[in-house]
């Protein structure tokens, strides 16, 4: 009897351990959601409090949430704890952290503090355009997440290298990071100039368009963190982390801007190469057509 019980104990699975493994990626998702919630509260506090400090902290919170969002999926795949629940939870957290929080931050920073001494009609038009454009950012981010969840093997219209993996459209964390890095670049000092508000409209609208576009953006998924890495790489990453932490306002903005323009450049280069191939193919097609029109004697 004791031997039989011992055999049953050996064959039993370990459900508690498995549930604990599912908890690990969810903690990172919860951390990303908490950062988004903190950003929203800081943006609201900026309306009646120290605007510069609260807006800067709101931007930093969004930037802080990006590595949490990048790690939860990787940890789930590395520990073999992916699930539909985790995927849905991650998408809902992204809508709040990288959709609602940056759209609210973009409006309050770029339009809410425009001076009352400005021309009343111009200020009203800028406020209305800001509300609409920031809503487009939120809508574009939610649409980007819905397309990502519903498309199992989406391919960009401008395919890249076959050994690399790409996102179809600008990912919402990168778009939110660009807006947050722009606010952090000026340490959260609110915009009070109409021409900066116009430029801000263009930037927010551009990021909304890039999210719903079918252009390719590098995903970095071919980077395998589970493999052994040389010690020099660890030192290099530590140096990069120090530079980012020490000069966060400049480095984060330049990195976000470079990532956005990488997608635009990839699309422009693909269009240019495609037109070049068409132009080179037209003379060959015209020559073959002329030979056929001259008859079999001249076509040899």
Image (cartoon, rainbow, N blue to C red):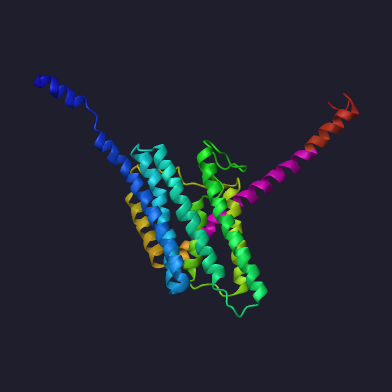
Q: Nearer the viewer, residue 45 or 90?
A: 45
Q: Is residue 174 visible?
A: yes
Image position, residue 266 (x, y; %)? 60, 49
Number of labelled discs? 0
Q: Main secondary structure of the magenta part?
A: helix
Left or right: residue 216 compared with residue 277: left
Q: Is residue 164 visible?
A: no
Q: Residue at x 18, y 26 (%)?
A: 10
Residue 293's image quarter?
top right
Image position, residue 80 (x, y; %)? 35, 36
Q: Nearer the viewer, residue 179 or 157?
A: 179
Is 276 contained in the magenta span? yes
Image position, residue 241 (x, y; %)? 38, 60
Q: Quadrant of the N terminus?
A: top left
Left or right: residue 234 compared with residue 280: left
Q: Residue at x 26, y 34 (%)?
A: 15
Is 201 contained in the magenta span? no
Q: Nearer the viewer, residue 63 or 53?
A: 53
Residue lying at the far bottom in this picture: please name it: 117
Q: Is residue 145 above or below residue 176?
A: above
Residue 22's image quarter?
top left
Q: Which residues are magenta?
A: 254-283
Image position, residue 81 (x, y; %)? 35, 38
Q: Residue at x 89, y 26 (%)?
A: 295
Q: Quadrant of the C terminus?
A: top right
Residue lying at the far left in this picture: please name it: 2
Q: Nearer the viewer, residue 92 or 292?
A: 92
Left or right: residue 246 compared with residue 125: left
Q: Is residue 200 above or below residue 5?
A: below
């Amino acid at each position: 009897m004791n031997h039989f019980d011992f055999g049953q104990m050996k064959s039993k699975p370990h459900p508690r351990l498995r549930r604990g493994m599912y908890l690990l990626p969810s903690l990172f998702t919860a951390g990303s959601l908490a950062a988004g919630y903190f950003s929203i509260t800081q943006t609201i506090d900026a309306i009646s409090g120290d605007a510069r400090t609260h807006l800067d902290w709101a931007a930093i919170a969004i930037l802080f949430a990006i590595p949490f969002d990048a790690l939860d999926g990787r940890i789930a795949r590395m520990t073999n704890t992916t699930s539909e629940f985790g995927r849905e939870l991650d998408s809902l957290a992204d809508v709040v952290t990288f959709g609602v929080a940056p759209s609210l931050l973009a409006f309050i920073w770029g339009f809410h503090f425009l001076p009352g001494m400005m021309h009343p009609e111009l200020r009203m038009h800028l406020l209305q355009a800001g509300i609409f454009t920031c809503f487009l950012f939120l809508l574009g981010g939610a649409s980007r997440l819905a397309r990502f969840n519903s498309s199992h093997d989406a391919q960009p219209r401008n395919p890249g290298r076959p050994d690399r993996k790409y996102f179809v459209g600008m990912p919402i964390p990168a778009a939110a990071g660009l807006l947050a890095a722009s606010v952090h670049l000026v340490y959260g000092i609110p915009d009070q100039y109409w021409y900066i508000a116009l430029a801000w409209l263009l930037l927010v609208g551009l990021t909304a368009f890039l999210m719903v576009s079918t252009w390719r953006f590098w995903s970095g998924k071919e980077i395998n963190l589970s493999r052994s890495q040389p010690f020099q790489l660890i030192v290099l990453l530590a140096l990069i982390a120090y530079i980012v932490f020490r000069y966060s306002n400049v480095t984060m903005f330049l990195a976000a801007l470079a990532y956005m323009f990488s997608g635009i450049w990839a699309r422009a280069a693909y269009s240019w190469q495609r037109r070049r191939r068409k132009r080179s193919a037209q003379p060959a097609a015209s020559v073959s057509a002329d030979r056929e029109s001259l008859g079999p004697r001249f076509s040899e």
